[in-house]
Amino acid sequence: MSTRIHLTLATGDYESIRALKEGSVKPDGIELTVLTDMTSDVRHWRMIRNQEFDIAELSMSNFLMAKYTGLPFVAIPVFLHRRFRHGFVFLNATKGITKPTDLIGRKVGLRNFQATANLWIRGILEHEHAVPHRQIQWFKQDEEEVEWAPPPDLQIQRVAPGKSVEKMLVDGELDALIHPEVIQPILDKDPRVARLFPNYRDLEVDYFKRTGIFPIMHTTAIKQEVVEKYPWVPINLMQAFEQSKKAAYKRMENPRIVPWLGFVTFSKSKKRFSAEIPGFTALARSTETRWKY
């Protein structure tokens, strides 16, 4: 194509998009301005509420909620963020919670209810560990990206303005907390806080071997008007993302790039591990499971 259209892409600052950001990979027909200087929650809010970007890495559950409510986005199967989630259920260590079913009837904090991380964790707790999400008292800190009315049988309330669910957990106001990041008290080794699953890495390996699922956190969304005007944009973007990812893999084969003992051996074992499930089969399983959750 002789004339490039200018589009903005908001995304996390991942190694996999380095080539796109630096310009060594260019989508055919597109001049990208890549924006990486914001947190994921800010990016999701700005895309969903204000449609500020042409393309954005977007929470998968936010995208599904946005489509359900009729917001004009199209997604492509470019999943820039995946993560296992067994290690993101945190407990107040004084509450006597020793197994998942101890969470039934308890006060559990959230940043917000719709976050994809929370969706996966709630689904895993319910379908793998017999903890119905409607039998938990939920306390959320933030407003949802997509406006919604909770079902009447869902016990959920907003904490007081200015209160932090992390601090509420440490202080014992909450029994547990589901969070998309490793919370600071865990990083600080605060004895008042623990994980529900101390052996979360073993559980994640078992989950993958049984299901073939490496949970998708974020998809890539394009404004509907861009796709309608330029229907070739999605496929050209997908090809460029794939080229950028391959460049990242190639770059990281150099042991000087990641000065972490054993990284190259570890990354090769991960590739073999992931290759056990074909791509489209894994995607179908992940999609079906997400809808079930």
Image (cartoon, rainbow, N blue to C red):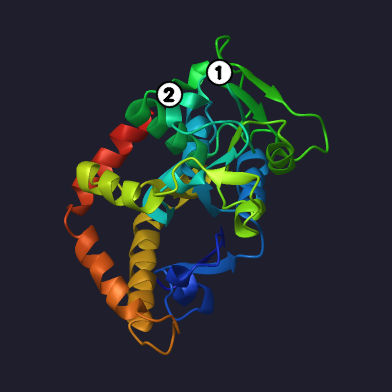
Q: Residue at x 48, y 37 (%)?
A: 61
What is the three-letter code of the residue carrying label 1? Answer: Gly
Q: Residue at x 44, y 25 (%)?
A: 101
Mark closest to the chain's N terminus, 2 or 1: 1
Q: Position of residue 252 (x, y in %)?
A: 37, 80
Indicate which disc residue 105 carries: 1
Q: Position of residue 203 (x, y in %)?
A: 33, 46
- Mark 2 surroundings within 10 Å by alpha-carbon count, few (fewer than 14), some (14 through 19), many (20 or more): many
Taking 230 as reference, is 283 left or right? left
Query: How many callouts does the rendering have?
Result: 2
What is the three-letter code of the residue carrying label 2? Answer: Val
- Classify the position of the C terminus by image quarter: top left
**Looking at the image, which residue sits at the far top?**
152
- Classify the position of the N terminus by image quarter: bottom left
Q: Is residue 105 above or below residue 218?
A: above
Residue that badge 2 annotates = 131
Q: Position of residue 199 (x, y in %)?
A: 39, 49
**Foreground residue, 85 or 228?**
85
